[in-house]
Image (cartoon, helix red, strand yellow):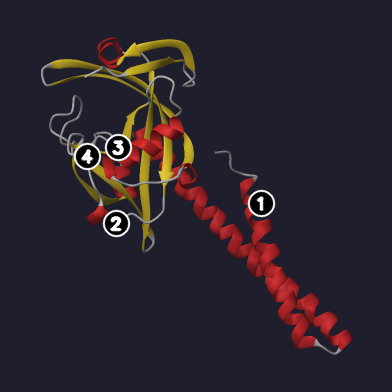
Amino acid sequence: MTEEIFDIVDEKGQPTGETVTRSQAHAEGIRHRTAHIWVTRENGDKTEVLLQKRALNKDSFPGRYDTSSAGHIQAGDEPLESAVRELSEELGIHVDEDDLHFAGTFPIQYEKEFHGKMFKDNEIAFVYVYDDEADIDNLTIQKEELDSVEWFDLEEVYQACQPPRNEKFCAPMGGLEIVRKYVNEQENVSNSMVRGMSVGMSTGMFIGAAIGIATDRIGTFMCMGMIWGMIFGSILGKRKNNNKNDF
């Protein structure tokens, strides 16, 4: 089997024009890129993340719970196309590129012994979030890569990965922090839209009532004002929140 080839990248994850084999990258700690996909869902007032339990034959952190899906970015490939492919290969979740939301990047660097052999990791991880419906009972998991998947409360996993880390998990803190930020920003978008709709509806009803009184068609214009107020209010609320975010 042909060995995987990675792009060597700089501190920002940009290819330098040089490549390295997988074995050399992890033997010498040469920086390369990976794609990390976090599958999330809302469960009541909590956000849950789908974690995979790594197969026991993995060359790092065997048997521990990790990011929903992750993999190396092959030389010449782009992070987004790699994320789409990894999600399909590891979990059987088939998505379009527009279904994944880019949330940021973070570095991973460590040296640790696994299976009696030193493993050096030095990577820039590109993080994507998939928050559409995912039925884990119907997933087709890649047994060579993982044993199983399970939903966990995002905040509980985040706390469990704080020092001293619960050894049940190997999910990277950098990825968890990015996902938490993404989830919080999405909640802010939703709240801004609701506030905008409320203000817009009230304003629209007031203006509609004024026009309705003047034209003796108060019911019609109040309804029209309420509808248009809700629409414009939600748009303005979303735009206001987007100006605060930079993903």
Under tag 4, what secondary structure?
Answer: loop
Residue type at mark 4: give it. Answer: Gln
**Residue linked to disc 2:** 135
Under tag 1, what secondary structure?
Answer: helix
Residue 135: image location, x then y, percent: 29, 56
Q: Earlier in the sequence, mark 1 or mark 4?
A: 4
Q: Earlier in the sequence, mark 2 or mark 3?
A: 2
As drawn, 113 above or below 245: above
Q: Are marks 4 and 2 in contact (CB under 8 Å)?
A: no
Q: Image quadrant of residue 64?
A: top left
**Residue linked to disc 1:** 240
> Could you give the CA–CA distance between mark 4 and mark 3, rounded to whole angstroms?
29 Å
> Could you give the CA–CA distance between mark 1 and mark 3, rounded to whole angstroms?
34 Å
For marks 2 and 3, give the one nearer the viewer.
2
For marks 1 and 3, give the one nearer the viewer.
1
Q: Earlier in the sequence, mark 1 or mark 3?
A: 3
Task: Please give the label number shown on residue 37.
Answer: none
For marks 4 and 3, give the one nearer the viewer.
4
> Could you give the CA–CA distance between mark 2 and mark 3, rounded to whole angstroms?
29 Å
Category of crowding for the residue at label 1, using alpha-carbon neighbours closer than 10 angstroms: few (below 14), some (14–19), many (at least 20): some
Task: Please give the label number shown on residue 142.
Answer: 4
Q: Earlier in the sequence, mark 4 or mark 3?
A: 4
Residue 224: image location, x then y, percent: 74, 77
Question: In the visual, does 221 lie left or right of 35?
Answer: right
Q: Residue at x 27, y 39 (%)?
A: 90
As drawn, 102 above or below 224: above
Residue type at mark 2: give it. Answer: Asp
Residue 38: image location, x then y, percent: 36, 43
Category of crowding for the residue at label 4, using alpha-carbon neighbours closer than 10 angstroms: few (below 14), some (14–19), many (at least 20): some
Q: Residue at x 82, y 84 (%)?
A: 212
